[in-house]
Image (cartoon, rainbow, N blue to C red):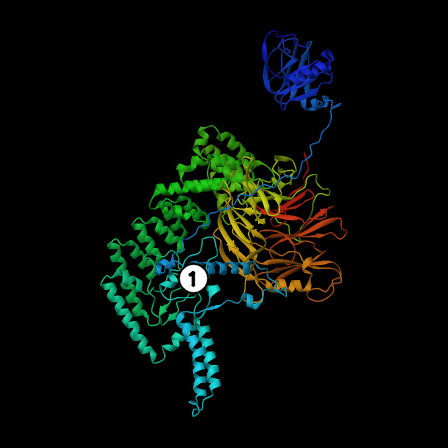
């Protein structure tokens, strides 16, 4: 044994051992090392041939039975005075120095400079057979579970039962099914026809539907009148009349066609046309996730005929008829014959919505039809109601007073459904009807009515919350962005319920991985602040601006200093403020700005950090921009050290570079790992998808901070930057998805999804996917995919992908048209409510492009999130340009079709693929003239010159991708190069090769 000579029989906490290899031999020393080896252990060789074994944790050992000379840990510096406890001793200091005392002499070595030994080199694989595993067959593709449909739907009323009509016969049901299947086949039939330009007119024409009385008039004019004149003329009864029978026949046929055009409707398009009275109000509402129904067509010809009729002698008779109706209706209300009065009542015009929403009421000479449904408010209203031609101001005022008196009396009698019906359907005052139902505890009915009539979002959320359907309240608040206003509205009447809603808001953000969102939701209520302490710690772990916002909130919590954790938090905040690096990516400017409005709980800590933040603001030239920058700096000075504040000057903005568009060059050699997607996070780290090599979190210099083995082909990053979805391509339209929590750095498998395309980002809750020819929105917090909203589908088809920002998204859509070819449009929605804001036709632009190029060689167009279409037209050398002239070299024309005047940009080189886009940022890749690399022209929206250019040398094939997040734009190529700049392109934030380290 190589035991020490001193301290025989005692035990010491050994952090390692010095093994005398020249004495015991290398095989024995290696055996002792392997017996003691632990993870993170280290083995070094001393100059005299002995080995130094360092253990990750101390072990207690007897000195007389130790495998070598025990190594003890001491403080800084070498021991002073006597040379150790015995004739031989070994110690290691905290600063990494080895002190050996032997035979009265002391020798000091620096551990970090000693040569390392690897025990793996001792293994001898000689004689071992190497067997490489081979797959027995192709791995089966995972099965995608069905998507559960949770799109909010409104129950459709049973119109047959309401009208007293029995169930349809078996033959009628069979004919209806055949008609629907035929219509489905027409919808699925690809456009093109014989000429390739769309379906023929007879395939797109819709039949004319006529009411029975109008059909009788058409038949009489078309058949009876001509036949009667032909018979009379044949009998010789019309010989003495100077009348041309042929002219009369032609006039009768023309009158029949005109009558059909005036009073007919396109059955397949409108499904019923505009009606008078309650018929327009009681129409069934669509499912919540489908398109809103088309507004009832205004019968402008009928409106014109009604106005012309009032100028004829028949106006007196019509006036008497309507006056009689008004007397009978008034008598029914005064006699409290509520059933007759309410069913025969004339709905008044929707004065709350005005002309912009419901449309200007039209004139009608017909009396309202008797209402046959239930006397309760209808949740949805379809189009404006018709106004009687004799309903002047006096009549309108009379009916208003009559209806209001009836509503008050019905409410006193406890007939709340009828009272709400009067307010919502007859008086067009749904807000008053909701208030009535709320007063009497009809919360669910009030919530349905408020949501169906599109009342204020905070009112809808408050009603659903109080009714007990809290999940629907949270979904509505998220979809319409009404959490804050709903909490304020609820706090005025029920503070406890408001606190519970605020806690649900914070939990909703927490489930989406938005730690700062949870903090902002709960922070105004001091009782809820302790519940977000863990969220703040996770936000600090994310680094960057997220850490800068979280640290002041932690320092503002008094219990933090009671738990003695405030010292470490204060030290971290001070290190960020005094550190170097870009003030945006390090979070320094955000930390200083947040400290200005949120003082620390400890006065001494607050003064120290306010002083450091003021110095940082002066050094960085401000607090990140903004109109309130001067007031924030004054707040810091007011709390900073007075002597330091007196000497600090005001921040002066740093000069920005001006001139030509910046040009950047990526690393000259490819990386060792493929890059299929990459995005720069707010913390300065890069999240990279490397295909079968998994996903990696890299530092700006390329060091690997975290690695996940989940195969990743695409990244869907959350807007808040705290999480992402790792997407794996399993085959055509088959995607595997896994949740990545960047705060805890954990991956959780989620589901396998059948979808053609995914939006490149999401809000942490709702994922936008292209599936089944339309758009489906999935709830990613559910254990399995649940569809909470749908757009398009059916006859309207989605073309290409979806570009999204936090506030909206856009896509290229093809929809049916009465013309020969379908419409091609760019649809733009506002998020998160999915309000359709624009439909811009781009048929002419695409037709003009295809007329000059070969469709097979034309790159796919891209719809930008803000609206507008981005198209690419290659111009090989010698080909005529779009405005005349011959191209002297290979060129590419990048053209924008938007609401603004069209813009175009001509670039050198021919782009083989269409542009890559994320939100409103785009990048078009063209080969370099020598063919040895790729150059990307990048910009934001329509522009006359590119914002910057990115050169990737020694690259070919795939285009350069682009991602935008947190004020930074990332450019990546499959060859393993990643480059990131600021949003304006003036600052280079990262440039690296992705390699195995």
Q: For the N terminus, which image quadrant?
A: top right
Q: Position of residue 189 (x, y in %)?
A: 57, 60
Q: Residue lying furthest left in this view?
A: 335
Which residue in the protein does label 1 denote? 357
Front residue of this view, candidates 630 and 713: 713
Q: Where residue 855 appears, x then y in whole percent?
A: 67, 60
Determine the image quadrant of residue 711.
top right
Please rate how many residues cluster around mark 1, counting C-alpha atoms within 10 Å: few if below 14, some from 14 to 19, many from 20: few
User: 77 or 52: nearer the eye?
Assistant: 52
Q: Looking at the image, which residue is at 68% across and 16% down?
A: 31
Q: Image quadrant of residue 381?
A: bottom left
599 left or right, relative to 414: right
Left or right relative to 469: residue 904: right
Q: Residue 491's x, y, as percent?
A: 36, 45
Q: Residue at x 45, y 33 (%)?
A: 602
- Image coordinates of residue 818 in percent, x first then y, are 54, 66
Callout 1: SS: loop
């Amino acid at each position: 044994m190589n035991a020490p000579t001193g301290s025989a029989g005692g035990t010491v906490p050994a952090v390692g051992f010095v093994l005398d290899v020249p004495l015991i031999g290398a095989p024995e020393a290696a055996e002792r090392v392997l017996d003691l080896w632990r993870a993170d252990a280290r083995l070094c060789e001393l100059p005299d041939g002995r080995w130094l074994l360092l253990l990750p944790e101390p072990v207690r050992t007897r000195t007389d039975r130790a495998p070598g000379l025990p190594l003890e840990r001491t403080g800084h510096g070498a021991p002073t005075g006597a040379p150790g406890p015995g004739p031989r001793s070994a110690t290691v200091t905290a600063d990494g120095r080895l002190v050996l005392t032997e035979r009265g002499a002391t020798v000091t070595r620096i551990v970090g400079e000693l040569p390392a030994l690897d025990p793996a080199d001792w293994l001898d694989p000689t004689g071992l057979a190497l067997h490489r595993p081979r797959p027995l067959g192709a791995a089966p593709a995972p099965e995608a579970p069905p998507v559960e449909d949770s799109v909010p739907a409104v129950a459709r009323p049973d119109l047959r039962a309401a009208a007293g009509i029995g169930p349809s016969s078996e033959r009628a049901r069979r004919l209806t099914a055949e008609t629907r299947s035929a219509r489905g086949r027409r919808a699925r039939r690809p456009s093109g026809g014989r000429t390739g330009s769309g379906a023929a007119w007879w395939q797109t024409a819709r039949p004319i539907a006529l009411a029975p009385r109008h059909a009788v008039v058409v038949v009489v004019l078309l058949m009876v009148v001509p036949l009667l004149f032909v018979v009379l003329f044949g009998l010789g009864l019309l010989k003495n009349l100077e009348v041309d029978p042929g002219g009369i026949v032609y006039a009768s046929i023309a009158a029949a066609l005109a009558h059909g055009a005036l009073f007919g409707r396109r059955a397949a398009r409108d499904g019923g046309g505009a009606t008078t009275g309650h018929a327009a109000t009681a129409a069934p509402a669509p499912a919540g996730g489908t398109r809103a129904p088309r507004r009832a067509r205004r019968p402008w010809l009928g409106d014109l005929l009604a106005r012309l009729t009032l100028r004829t002698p028949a106006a007196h008779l019509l006036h008497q008829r309507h006056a009689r109706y008004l007397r009978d209706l008034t008598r029914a209300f005064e006699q409290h014959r509520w059933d007759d009065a309410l069913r025969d009542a004339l709905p008044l015009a929707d004065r709350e919505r005005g002309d912009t929403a419901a449309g200007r009421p039209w004139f009608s000479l017909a009396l309202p039809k008797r209402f046959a449904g239930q006397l309760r408010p209808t949740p949805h209203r379809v189009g404006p109601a018709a106004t009687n031609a004799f309903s002047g101001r006096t009549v309108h005022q009379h009916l208003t007073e009559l209806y209001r008196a009836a509503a008050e009396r019905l409410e006193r009698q406890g007939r709340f459904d009828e009272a709400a019906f009067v307010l919502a359907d007859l008086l067009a005052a749904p807000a008053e009807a909701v208030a009535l139902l709320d007063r009497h505890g009809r919360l669910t009915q009030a919530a349905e009515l408020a949501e169906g009539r599109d009342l204020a979002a905070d009112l809808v959320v408050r009603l659903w919350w109080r009714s007990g359907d809290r999940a629907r309240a949270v979904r509505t608040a998220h979809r319409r962005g009404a959490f804050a206003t709903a909490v304020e509205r609820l706090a005025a009447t029920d503070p406890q319920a408001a606190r519970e809603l605020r806690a649900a808001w914070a939990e909703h953000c927490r489930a989406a991985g938005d730690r700062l969102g949870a903090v902002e939701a709960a922070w105004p209520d001091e009782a809820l602040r302790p519940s977000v302490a863990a969220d703040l710690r996770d936000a600090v772990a994310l680094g960057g601006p997220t850490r800068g916002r979280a640290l002041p909130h932690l320092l503002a919590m008094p219990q933090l200093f009671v738990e003695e954790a405030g010292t470490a938090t204060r030290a971290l905040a001070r290190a960020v403020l005094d550190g170097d690096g870009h003030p945006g990516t390090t979070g320094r400017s955000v930390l200083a700005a947040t400290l200005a409005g949120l003082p620390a709980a400890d006065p001494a800590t607050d003064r120290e950090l306010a002083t450091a933040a003021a110095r940082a603001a002066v050094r960085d030239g401000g607090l990140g921009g903004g109109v309130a920058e001067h007031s924030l700096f004054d707040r810091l000075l007011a709390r900073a050290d007075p002597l330091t504040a007196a000497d600090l000057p005001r921040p002066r903005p740093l000069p920005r570079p001006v001139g030509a568009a910046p040009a950047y060059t990526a690393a000259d050699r490819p990386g060792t790992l493929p890059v299929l997607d990459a995005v720069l996070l707010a913390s300065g780290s890069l999240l990279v998808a490397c295909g079968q090599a998994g996903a990696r979190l890299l530092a700006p210099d390329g060091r690997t901070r975290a690695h996940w083995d989940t195969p990743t082909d695409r990244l869907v990053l959350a807007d808040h930057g705290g999480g992402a979805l790792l997407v794996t391509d399993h085959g055509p339209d088959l995607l595997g998805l896994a949740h990545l929590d960047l705060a805890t750095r954990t991956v959780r498998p989620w589901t396998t999804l059948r979808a053609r395309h995914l939006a490149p980002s999401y809000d942490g809750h709702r994922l936008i996917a292209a599936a089944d020819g339309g758009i489906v929105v999935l709830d990613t917090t559910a254990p399995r995919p649940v569809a909470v909203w749908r757009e398009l589908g059916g006859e309207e088809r989605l073309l290409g992908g979806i570009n999204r920002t936090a506030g909206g998204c856009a896509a290229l859509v093809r929809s049916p048209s009465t013309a020969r070819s379908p419409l091609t449009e760019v649809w733009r929605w506002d998020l998160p409510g999915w309000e359709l804001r624009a439909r811009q036709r781009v048929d002419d632009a695409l037709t003009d492009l295809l007329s000059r190029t070969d469709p097979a060689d034309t790159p796919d167009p891209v719809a930008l999130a803000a609206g507008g279409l981005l198209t690419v037209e290659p111009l090989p050398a010698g080909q005529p340009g779009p405005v005349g002239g011959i191209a002297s070299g290979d060129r590419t024309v990048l053209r924008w079709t938007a609401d603004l005047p069209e813009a175009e940009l001509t670039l050198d080189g021919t782009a083989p693929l269409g542009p890559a886009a994320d939100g409103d940022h785009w990048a078009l890749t063209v080969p370099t003239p020598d063919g040895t690399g790729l150059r990307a022209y990048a910009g934001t929206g329509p522009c006359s010159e590119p914002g910057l250019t990115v050169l990737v040398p020694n690259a070919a094939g795939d285009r350069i991708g682009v991602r935008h997040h947190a004020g930074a734009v990332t450019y990546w190529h499959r060859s393993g190069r990643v480059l990131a700049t600021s949003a304006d392109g003036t600052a280079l934030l990262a440039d690296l090769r992705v390699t195995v380290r």
